[in-house]
Amino acid sequence: MGSAALLAPGHLVGRLREAYGSPPPSPLLAPGGDPLELLVLTLLSQATGDSGAALAYRRLRERFPGWADVARADTEEGAAAIAPGGLSRRKAPRIQAILRRLHAERGAYSLDFLRGLPSPEAYSRLTDFPGVGPKTAACVLLFAFGAPHFPADVHILRVAERAGLIGRGGAGEAQDALAVLFAPAEYLDLHLYLILHGRTVCRPRPKCPDCCLRAGCAAGGGAGRSGAGRIQSEAAGGSGTASRLTTRSSPPRMDRTFNR
């Protein structure tokens, strides 16, 4: 695919802004919110939709008002409370393990200690918790602290792969590759725009004629092939996108602390 036909990262942000207006708010995560609440919400959102995760969180806090109550609860009762979010027997013990470890190590049910840490160290501390992968850690750091991490969920990965921004690979590598392409000040807005675009237009069965990125999209016609033909080729196992992720030319700008 010729790089001249692809949409420049800066233009991508502009086209999404023109198409959707102001960035859509996240149904679950509020910028500047409590980091522990954001962590639990993100864990509950794994493998389920926003509405299921929100309902699971609400029922958890209604049944167990304090984090100490959640930590001490019978695990089966905790799992029953978060059942609307799915995989409750997997998520409940993970949430309790995180809470118990925080209290044992820090004497409090809080992630506020992350504020004064260098960003890579904060990321490492989060991913050391059970069930916390690259996307979950990046969500907490970006939304709670405004730290320069780019969370990439399945929708973002799909859009970014089809647009030729990255190749196929793991979530952590994809996040690092995307972080290099965009300015940290754009991470939050772009994260929200790409999720919306992936849910409404660049779906598993995409609506390429309706896509604001089509003219510069590697899969949607910008590289000389129709979106349908290109994406059908990918679904059949063809090499629609690069087999490796975009090569990073410099490390991400994540070497500062993020006091607020």
Image (cartoon, grey):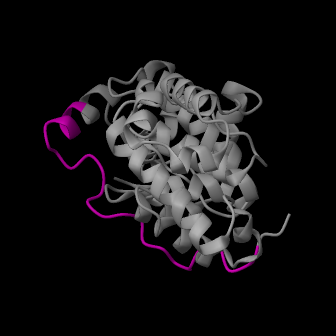
33 in relation to 16, above or below: below
Q: Position of residue 77 (x, y in %)?
A: 43, 34
Residue 70: in magenta span: no
Q: Is residue 97 left or right of residue 36?
A: left
Q: Residue at the far right: name it.
A: 260
173 in relation to 228, above or below: below
| Residue 7, visible in the rendered structure | no
Residue 225 sits in which quadrant?
Answer: top left
Residue 102 sits in which quadrant?
Answer: bottom right
Q: Position of residue 212 (x, y in %)?
A: 57, 28
Magenta span of residues: 232-257
Q: Is residue 227 left or right of residue 11?
A: left
Magenta span main SS:
loop
Q: Residue at x 32, y 23 (%)?
A: 205
Q: Residue at the far left: name it.
A: 236
Q: Residue at x 37, y 37 (%)?
A: 76
Q: Position of residue 22 (x, y in %)?
A: 77, 30
216 in relation to 53, above or below: below
| Residue 137 or residue 76, whichever sits in front | 76
Quarter of the figure with the C terminus = bottom right
Number of numbered discs on residues: 0
Residue 245: in magenta span: yes
| Residue 159, visible in the rendered structure | yes
Q: Position of residue 236 (x, y in %)?
A: 13, 37
Residue 3 sits in which quadrant?
Answer: bottom left
Q: Residue at x 51, y 30 (%)?
A: 53
Q: Residue at x 68, y 80 (%)?
A: 255
| Residue 53 or residue 3, whichever sits in front | 53
